[in-house]
Image (cartoon, rainbow, N blue to C red):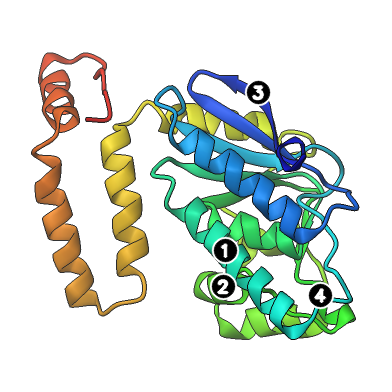
Amino acid sequence: MPEKLCTIQSRSNGIAIVAIPGSSDTSARELLEAIRRQTSALAGKDDINGLIFTSSEGGFCRCLIESSSSVRDAGELASFGQQVAFSLEKTGKPCITAVEGECSGLGLEIALACDFIVASQTASFGFTGIAAGLIPFCGGSQRLARLVGKSKTKELIYSGDLINAAEAYRIGLINRLYSEGDALTETVKLLEHICTRSPNAIRIGGEIVNAGYDIDLQTACMLERDAFALCFASFDQREGMQAFLDKRTPQFKGE
């Protein structure tokens, strides 16, 4: 069953850790479907405030691309993969990928669709599909270019080489770099801290960053203005302001 390919490794303190196989004979379609189902289910749960994607084995999110696929089949796979990636961006909850080993191909595409990536010093990243005459297909070429620039993205796609975690951190592909074996533990701490903030403001803030990224600055700032004003209609804003005045910890509800 596809669900077994994407399992809840842990679920506590409002955080779901989603484990995705690092080594599998599973097809890309099956793995993407498993990710879609699990993400959709978690996004709809009120007791889940944030998601961490990690590997259940060595690398992150490895799979098979069928060599016998027709042009039509390949196009349909890419369309579905892009839908899954967009759905990750629209969960309305913080999503982080924690990487310990290799994160390449589809794994890197899924990681790029999350809010950001953190990794241990043993991690590596790249698009290796060029060796089989392939390129990214879930929007990875576009997300990576927007993150690290066109030139570096072309280098990674053209060469198929992996870069180490230190280089990934240097170019801005990953946000934080941890010691070997500490990526998941430290990510849980980071997300627990994030989840003490207003879920409502996190959702709106993420939506504004995504919506404004590819449009002109003036229009994007107008979106930010309207979203900022909308925050004042929320319980979270009133609670946050009152808690500040009372010198106490706010009790946010995401409303």
Q: Quadrant of the N terminus?
A: top right
The kind of residue tagged 2 is Val
- Which residue is located at x 77 percent, y 62 percent? 104
Distance from label 3 to label 2 (Cα)?
Answer: 32 Å
Q: Earlier in the sequence, mark 1 or mark 3?
A: 3
Residue beneath disc 4:
129
Distance from label 3 to label 4 (Cα)?
Answer: 32 Å
The kind of residue tagged 3 is Ser
**Does 187 sit left or right of 70 as displayed?**
left
Residue 166, visible in the rendered structure: no
**Does 110 sit left or right of 115 as displayed?**
right
Residue beneath disc 2:
148
Residue 72, visible in the rendered structure: yes
- Which residue is located at x 80 percent, y 37 percent? 56
Q: Earlier in the sequence, mark 3 or mark 2?
A: 3
Q: Please say if the residues under marks 4 and 2 sit with CB atoms less than 8 Å apart.
A: no
Would you place residue 98 above or below residue 69 in this image?
Answer: above
Q: Please say if the residues under marks 3 and 4 sit with CB atoms less than 8 Å apart.
A: no
Q: Earlier in the sequence, mark 1 or mark 4?
A: 4
Percent position of residue 231, x then y:
15, 42
Distance from label 4 to label 2 (Cα)?
Answer: 19 Å
Residue beneath disc 3:
10
Q: Earlier in the sequence, mark 3 or mark 4?
A: 3
Q: Earlier in the sequence, mark 4 or mark 2?
A: 4
Percent position of residue 44, x then y:
43, 34
Residue beneath disc 1:
172
Instruction: From the viewer's side, name the closer residue of 247 and 11.
Output: 11
Question: Disc 3 on helix, strand or loop?
Answer: strand
